[in-house]
Amino acid sequence: MQKIVFSGVQPSGMLTLGNYLGAIRQFVALQDEADQAYYCVVDLHATTVRHDPKTLRDYTLMVSKLYLASGIDPNRATIFVQSHVPEHAELAWLLQCVARTGELSRMTQFKEKGGDKETVSVGLYTYPVLMAADILLYQTTHVPVGEDQKQHLELTRDLAERFNRDYGEVFRLPETIIPDVGSRIMSLDDPTKKMSKSNPSEMGRIHLLDPDDIIEKKIMRAVTDSENVIRYDPEKKPGVSNLLAILALVRGEHPEVLAEAFSGQGYGALKRSVADAVLEVLRPIKERYEHLTDEETLKILREGADRAQAIARKTYREAAQAFGYICRESS
Ligand code: ATP
Ligand code: LTN
């Protein structure tokens, strides 16, 4: 069976070190292993909360460039913008008629983003169904994501299974790939919360394009604890463990082993090593980003959308036909 990888990132802000270590690094590794890899900039998802149209356009281009700068190769993977392939919204509608309000009400991310308020958009509520459509359109076998997306992937499998059972075998059930370490990089100023690109606190996150001195400052000021003992214990020592996890990921080592190596040293030494490692891993990304033009990025996105749409259209038609919508053209 072919290995088909799909994943997406929202253009809802500047990408963070959490996005890179939790998701994008896996995207780069998987483009070589997979028979097909699709990496989408999910702009339809980014409009489920209040947004500024101009900022959305800027971030859409910026995230696309950061995909390229991080090492995603348009010759090995298909990079595209979600709204350029309308089948995503079309299949989402069909799947909204398969999904149940009960299962969407149980989505923890919806609740965390204010789902109890009457003023949140209907799009925020149905967002996991759009995500299922993204994945199922490409007959995806593997979806690399961070820990926070696990529940959405379970819903995707449930919807695919229900559709296949009730209307005929159209969709493949995807597997989730979540890294053991790095699936949840925590905020630097509040290590009990996830490092998130849309959180108002700037000091909690490292942007991939932050200048070196700002990165150093954010890491050197990271919240730890008063014990001054280096130990990997995410429950009891979330700040120190987060720094160890970041260092381990960047160096390709284990956080427990690193903790041993740092034993007897203070938090200052650990922070210095983390800062140096992060600066080194981000340097080539920043350099490549500077050299990418809007024109060449837009060309890659157009070609990506053409390739993606050819596959998406085929799956959508199969699903629509199985569901009872008659075809406009004879296919
Ligand atoms: P937002 O703050 O707008 O919700 P986000 O920073 O959580 O955004 P997404 O676009 O939702 O980012 O996520 C893109 C990918 O990055 C997803 O696979 C997600 O699981 C992963 N990811 C996001 N934040 C982290 C983090 N702190 N640690 C590890 N992975 C993360
Ligand atoms: N919901 C995800 C982004 C996302 C996604 C996808 C990830 C949208 N569609 C399909 C994997 C596969 C998020 O907020 N991180």
Image: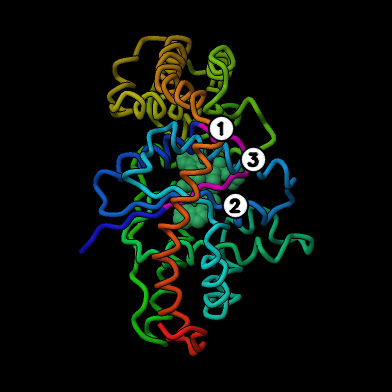
Q: Earlier in the sequence, mark 3 or mark 1?
A: 1
Q: Please, what is the three-letter code of the amino acid marked with disc 1?
A: Ser
**SS for tag 1?**
loop
Residue 195 showing in the rendered view: no
What residue is shown with label 3? Answer: 198
Q: Residue at 41% of width from left, 74% of height from top? A: 160
| Image: magenta residue range | 7-16
Which of 293 and 116 lies nearest the eye of the viewer?
Answer: 293
What residue is shown with label 2? Answer: 43
Residue 177 in the image: state x and y as whole percent. Answer: 34, 51
Q: Residue at 49% of width from left, 47% of height from top? A: 301
Residue 9 in the image: state x and y as whole percent. Answer: 51, 47
Q: Is residue 47 above or below residue 298?
A: below
**SS for tag 2?**
helix
The answer as to whether callout 3 falls within 8 Å of ligand 1 is: yes
Depth check, mark 3 against mark 1: the one in front is 3
Tell me the distance, in whole angstroms, between the alpha carbons under discs 2 and 3: 14 Å
Q: Please, what is the three-letter code of the amino acid marked with disc 2?
A: Asp
What residue is shown with label 1? Answer: 187
Q: Earlier in the sequence, mark 2 or mark 3?
A: 2
What type of secondary structure mainly makes up the magenta span? loop
Q: Please, what is the three-letter code of the amino acid marked with disc 3?
A: Ser
| Residue 326 drawn in magenta | no
